[in-house]
Structures are given as C-alpha cells and as structure tokens.
Image: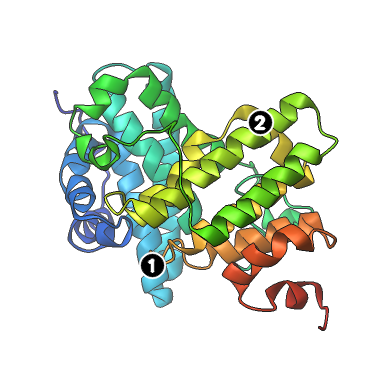
Amino acid sequence: MSPVALPANFTMLDLELLHFWTTQSIASFVDFPSCINLFQTTVVELGFSHPFLMHEILSLAALHLSNLRPDKASIYRHASDTHFATGLSLFQPAIRNLSDENCHACYAFSTMVFTHAWASQDPDKPSAIFFVPSSSTPQDLDVVHVQWVKLHRGSHEILQKRSALLREGPLEPLFTPWKGLDRNGPHPLPAVEEEQLSALSALAAASSLSAEQKLTLNEMLQKVRRVFSILAYNPKISQLSAVMSWFSMLSEDYLKMLEEKIPEALLIVVFYCVALKRAEHMWWVKGKGENLLRTVMGELGSGWETWTDWPVEQVLGVGGERRFFGIEK
C-alpha cells in the first residue's frame, strides 16, 4: 500500500492527539487486548495512507481529552469537530469507490465514527441515536441531523461487500472472537431474561400491526436475544462488542418503525438499554443506557408498565419507572 501525502498543516496539537491516542486513549475505547493493539498500530498505519481515517483518530482522541481536561475542553472540542468534519468529507468519496485497497480503512472508519456518535452525546439532552425526540428543542439538534445508526450499519454493508478480505486482512482481530458462533442457532438465556423477552414477543404477536411489521419485530427480538445470550454465556466475545453488535443487525424496516415511534418497536429498544447498561465500564458508554431509556420512555408514555417494569428497574434501579413518571407507590 503506497502512502498518501498527508496535509502539510497538521499542528503540534495534532501530534499531541496522536500521541495520546496511541499511549492512553485507545485503551478507554475498546475492551479487549488484541483490539487495543490493533487500533494502536495497524489502524494508525492505515491512517497514514488514508487521511480520512487519520482525521477520525485525531477527532476521537480530542473528544476524549475534552472529557478528561475540562479546563481546555473548548480547544479539544473544536479540534475534534474540525477533524471529524474533514474526515467525513474525505470518507464519502472513498466509500463511493470502495475497493480491495481502501476497504480496510473504510471499515475501520465506519466502526470508529459510530463510537464517536456515542462519545459525543450529551447525556443531559434526549438521545437522537434512532430518531428526533419529541422533547427536543431546535437548540438540541445539529444543523444537519446525522442518522448515526445508519452510519454504523454502513460498516455491516462494507463487511458484506468485502467479507473474506476483511476477515482475513489486517483487521482480523476484530473478527476472531466471533469465529465459530452460530448466528442462526438457539440463543439460550437466563431464566429472568427468557421470561421477560418471551412476554415482549407475545405482545408483538398479539398486536394489531401488519404481518410484515410483526415479522420485523420478531427478527429484531431474536437479535436482542442473541446479544443477551452472548453476554451471559460467551466470554470470548467482549461485553462491548456484544452490545454494539446489535446496531449492525438493524433492518431498514425496523428503523422506519422506530422513526414512526411505533410502541412495540420502541419497547425492544427499552429492553436493549439493559444490555447497554452492562457496557458502562467504558467511559463513552456510561450513562447512555439511562439516557436512551429515558428518551424512549418519554415517547412511550405510561400504560406499558407490564413490559417496562423489569428493564427500567435494571437500568434506573428499583422504583425507577415510578420516579420517571412522578408516581408514588
């Protein structure tokens, strides 16, 4: 792979960001050693040949530093926003011309940009991961609403187009823990989770939705089961990888149901928040399960307690739902 000339205007701040990324930051973004090493070395090397990826590395490092050093947060935030905008503008023509040469860098970028989405969320504002919340004000939203979840699904599309090349190439450590997993096989669950997800499945089956929508819900419920099953019984796959894998499995039909805020579709997200809560050992995930749950619960309103009591208790604690709606026992 021949190196591409990087812009001549990289600064001392950018060198600081790259040093911070390789020596400290990456260990706070991923949670298993082979992946840490991958992003410290191989992904940085890819970044020297594909500037869009280097800009995203620097953007994530700056975002992390803005969290760690509040006295200089505005400086790092500006650097993060600038590198992100530049990286995204360079990535768009690259992904339109996906090739055997650039697919590794494109896949790495697509996974990192979704991490960026989670890390940059303000937990004090409604989550816009899936849809524009009803409670949002114009000040809460970006000038251009980026559908982050679809950016993450883009990584799955890249994988489908270059599967063998990616799985056996320089990014192989990302895929090694998943080898041998029966993606379509049975997904056993602990008894409580089995009971709760079965009740949610029964609700979807008994709803007045169309046959196509019910099929979509059933497929997504199976994907949620898979995440919980991996968390309970497959220690080879890291908790973070298991939890975030759900986003690569979301269908267009399901995303449309979420955008339309169909209650049965929203309830699946409420259950997913339980899994998200279990990945809070990573700083950029901390508080995001609660934030997403509160956003979705705000769209649902009261009346769904039969199905929401357990997940809300898992995420917010005992009595969480009553406190959310201001109800005294």
Position of 298 relative to 59 (above/below): below
Number of residue marks:
2
The amino acid type, in three-letter code, at marker 1 is His
Q: Quadrant of the N terminus?
A: top left
Q: Residue furthest bottom?
A: 328
Rendered location of residue 199, percent (x, y):
69, 51
Q: What residue type is labelled 2?
A: Thr
Residue 122 visible in image:
no
> Which residue is labeled 2 in the image?
216
Q: In which quarter of the image is residue 193?
A: bottom right
Q: In this view, does 282 lie to the left or right of 249?
A: left
What's the residue at 27%, 34% (across, down)? 180
Q: Is residue 245 visible?
A: yes
Q: Which colour scheme is used?
A: rainbow
Front position in the image: 287 or 263: 263
In which quarter of the view is residue 157 placed? top left
* Residue drawn at the location 78% of the way across and 47% of the way down: 263
On screen, residue 234 above or below 52: below
Q: How many residues crowd mark 2 within 10 Å: few (<14), some (14–19), many (20+)?
A: many
Residue shown at the point (75%, 54%) measured from the top left: 138
Residue 51: x, y in percent? Answer: 29, 35
Tell whether label 1 touches label 2 (CB within 8 Å). no
Q: Mark 1 points at which residue?
A: 281
Quadrant including the C terminus: bottom right
**Mark 2 residue element:** helix
